[in-house]
Image: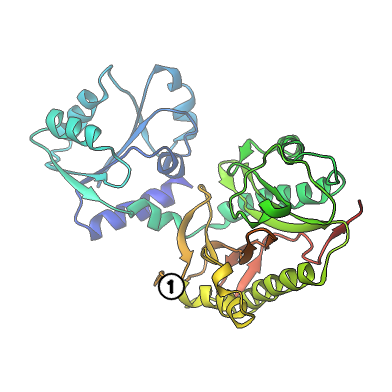
Amino acid sequence: MSTQRLNKLRQAMQEQQLEALLITSSVNRRYLTGFTGSAGYVLVTAQEAYLLTDFRYMTQAPEQATAFSVVEHSANVVDTMKELLAKGNISKLGFEQDLVPYSRYAMYSKHLAPVELVPVSGIMEEIRNFKDAEEIAIIEKATDIADRTFSHILNYIKPGVTEQEIELEMESFMRRLGATGTSFETIVASGERSALPHGVASEKVIGANEFVTLDFGAIYQGYVSDLTRTVFVGTPTDEHRKIYNIVLEAQLNTLKHLKPGMSGRDADALARDVIASHGYGDAFGHSTGHGIGMEVHEEPRLSKMSDTVLSPGMVVTVEPGIYIPGFGGVRIEDDVLITEDGIRVLTHSTKEFTILPV
């Protein structure tokens, strides 16, 4: 695993004429090395690949980062970096400009001199956009946990139960299924609160005759899932059914036509145009989707601002919604793998308008 990813990184470094690259992001560190510890730095040159960590991980790190030379760094890690850079005759060092605070940059610049620091953006993230078979299998396990959690929680949603009680049961169940955590703070938004796209679970008591939107995901072996379903408790009005059916139409239209070679902007339009055609364009204010992987928001974006071309191996969400203040809202979301000739939907929870008894 790590050897193939290391080769891809070195190729990208060569294209950008980088002698060496310092990786400080914990996500990128794990992706590249397989090391799951909480502390470490990665230094990659054309000939060498180092994982620098402290004494706590000197047994674990060599077992996980088999393609890397594991180095126990000194009390001041930059001293070890400087030694390795001198050993490799490195004069220029790339760093993750979007992830390194200015104070850290200033410290590196001072203590690593005369090595020149070169800002680099997105070099690891671009590689991470394309999931290999092993990654896809792990993501499918994470989506399976989410699907099973949705089926499970339907038995608990009823008037008198708080959103936070639903959240607790969902997160506990995902843990019991093997999740190491949640992809993000679980959203349970009922009634008028369902019009809040990011309405995290509150003390609100679920009532009769209202939407309940559930947006959640599981972390499994470092990868995430992201699933949204909206259900109804009680007896829906014609307006409730209308809103739900419009969002479902938009979501299904996107899944039907989504394919490689399409831009993020064009993908977004597949959902947005449907919702706008029904007169609810102003009620759909977020993008249609985003990439997922080791983080819950990655490239590419299915957004009217995105020119990124969708390619095989990318995993994205498709999640249109309508949000009406004072009334409620609906969002329906699946996780989708872009394939050579189309897509494969990774989440399988029912999207029929689920009506729960009071």
Give the total of numbered labels: 1
Q: Which SS class for mark 1?
A: loop
- Residue drawn at (41%, 27%) of the image: 39
Colour setting = rainbow
Residue 226 rendering spot, x and y as whole percentages: 62, 53
Judging depth in this view, the residue of 220 and 242 nearest the camera is 242
- Residue drawn at (54%, 71%) of the image: 282
Q: Which image quadrant is residue 109 in?
A: top left
The residue positioned farthest toward the left in the image shown: 114
- Residue drawn at (82%, 51%) of the image: 151
Q: Can I make out residue 263 in this image?
A: no
Q: Amino acid at mark 1?
A: Val
Query: Is residue 40 placed above or below 262 in the rendered structure?
Result: above
Judging depth in this view, the residue of 192 and 177 nearest the camera is 192
Query: Is residue 5 placed above or below 163 in the rendered structure?
Result: below
Judging depth in this view, the residue of 81 and 324 nearest the camera is 324
- From the viewer's perspective, tell me whether residue 122 is left or right of residue 353: left
Q: Which image quadrant is residue 29 in?
A: top left
| Residue bearing the label numbered 1 | 309
Q: Which image quadrant is residue 209 in?
A: bottom right
For label 1, the crowd category at 10 Å Cα-Cα, with few meaning under 14, some 14 to 19 and many 20 or more, is some
